């Protein structure tokens, strides 16, 4: 004999509702967080690339302000003061263009005391990526700190 009373599950319970709310909260958290991570990743890549470009001879190797394609200022991690001086004579906007940077940058040379720099120091950065390299500047081991940032 078949029973007309069968047990049916409820499609919507309080447990199901709580699970949906938690799931939506977690997804929202990741959606909000992801752009910040990718934005920082972009800054970090720009900082890495800039530090690599600076530690080359440049293109062409004996570049001048008029013909520079890549403004390398180093050979064997030794900073060439003449090339650094030439780079400093180029406008900030052109420097950014030469280095293919979307964001602002600042490069400083020094250990405890600032010896030299190029770019614009960050005033109120929203995000900041930093790469530090050890170079030889005026026959002294020196830190080259590359900062790429976006302002608030």
Image (cartoon, grey):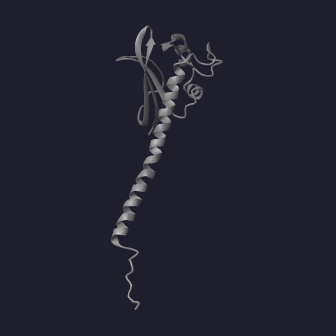
Question: Residue at coordinates 52% horizontally, 23% vertically from top-left?
Answer: 52
Front residue of 62/119: it is 62
Residue 48 spot, x, y in % from top left: 49, 28
Question: Residue 69 sits in which quadrant?
Answer: top right
Residue placed furthest toward the bottom: 1
Question: Residue 123 sits in which quadrant?
Answer: top left
Residue 13 spot, x, y in % from top left: 36, 73
Image side of residue 123 versus residue 92, left or right: left
Residue placed furthest toward the right: 67
Question: Residue at coordinates 37% horizontally, 17% vertically from top-left?
Answer: 111
How many numbered marks does the figure carry?
Answer: 0
Q: Is residue 1 above or below residue 12?
A: below
Front residue of 69/75: it is 75
Residue 41 spot, x, y in % from top left: 47, 38
Question: Residue at coordinates 40% horizontally, 92% vertically from top-left?
Answer: 1
Q: Is residue 103 above or below residue 21?
A: above
């Amino acid at each position: 004999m078949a029973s007309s009373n069968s047990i049916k599950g409820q499609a919507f319970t309080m447990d199901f509702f709580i699970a949906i709310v938690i799931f939506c909260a977690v997804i929202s958290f990741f959606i909000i967080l992801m752009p910040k991570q990718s934005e920082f990743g972009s800054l970090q890549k720009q900082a890495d690339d800039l530090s690599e470009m600076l530690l080359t001879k440049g293109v062409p190797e004996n570049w001048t302000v008029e013909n520079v394609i890549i403004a390398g200022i180093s050979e064997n991690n030794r900073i060439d003061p003449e090339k650094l001086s030439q780079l400093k004579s180029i406008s900030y906007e052109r420097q950014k263009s030469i280095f293919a940077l979307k964001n602002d940058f600042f490069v400083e040379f020094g250990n405890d005391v600032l010896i030299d720099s190029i770019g614009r120091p960050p005033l109120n950065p929203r995000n900041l990526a930093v790469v530090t390299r050890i170079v030889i500047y005026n026959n002294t081991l020196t830190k080259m700190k590359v900062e790429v940032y976006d302002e608030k």
